[in-house]
Image (tube, rainbow, N blue to C red):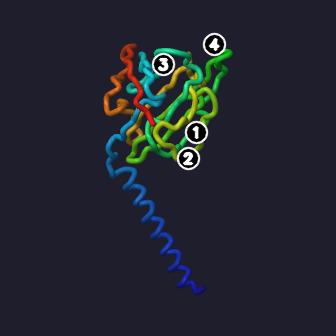
Amino acid sequence: MTATRVRTVVSVVVVLILAGVAVWFVERTVRPPGPRPAFQLPVACGETWRLSTYPGHGDFDVDLYPTSGETWGRPVLAAYAGTVVRAGINGRLGERTPDNPRGPMGRGGGYWVRIDHGGKWSTLYLHLLEPPAVSEGQRVEMGDQIGKVGSTGESSAPHLHFEQLRDGEKVESYFAGERSGITHDDEEYAVNHTSANCP
């Protein structure tokens, strides 16, 4: 191959790479987020859960507790269809289990999952009991089980910490098209919602 031909090939490759970078940049920074997906509570159909927060928790951060029955090990479901982009350990797990509920607390989110729903929307599920039931790159449908409620990471009691994010920023969670009511962490408060995450 002549030097001229090599330069031509290299030039074409560079142009293609730069075009790819430009498309990625436009996708990430210019295109606005799509409409909010029809998210559902990430728990079993028909169950009523208490959504709560407390000072210092973070605006829009939702902690979910069932209003009846055992909390440990309850199924955690995908709030909407999407692709798992994180599934594993966030921070340090700690040693809190159903058999040792007051064991040493960990740090961060413990066992966790993040799902990309497209249109720059994603959801987070933290403090799962055990390694997630899904893996990175896996496609999930709304209602698929992704884990179980636990107390790993920085968690004082078994619960599910949940977030909805638009373009990487936390926003108020909506379930079945209605506002969750959890918007700020200026005070401790809670609201009840019944899951419509049904087959």
Q: State how far apart marks 2 and 4 are (Cα).
A: 34 Å
Residues under numbered marks 3 and 1 in contact, where contact means CB atoms less than 8 Å apart:
no
Residue named by callout 1:
87
Q: Residue at x 40, y 33 (%)?
A: 40
Residue named by callout 2:
138
Q: Is residue 95 left or right of residue 156?
A: right
Q: Is residue 87 left or right of residue 68?
A: right
Q: Callout 3: helix, strand or loop?
A: strand
Identified by mark 4, the residue type is: Arg
Residues under numbered marks 1 and 4 in contact, where contact means CB atoms less than 8 Å apart:
no
Look at the image and tell me whether residue 183 can be seen.
no
What numbered label is drawn on residue 102? 4
Q: State how far apart marks 2 and 1 are (Cα).
A: 10 Å
Q: Residue at x 45, y 29 (%)?
A: 45
Q: Position of residue 100 (x, y in %)?
A: 67, 15
Q: State how far apart marks 3 and 2 are (Cα).
A: 28 Å
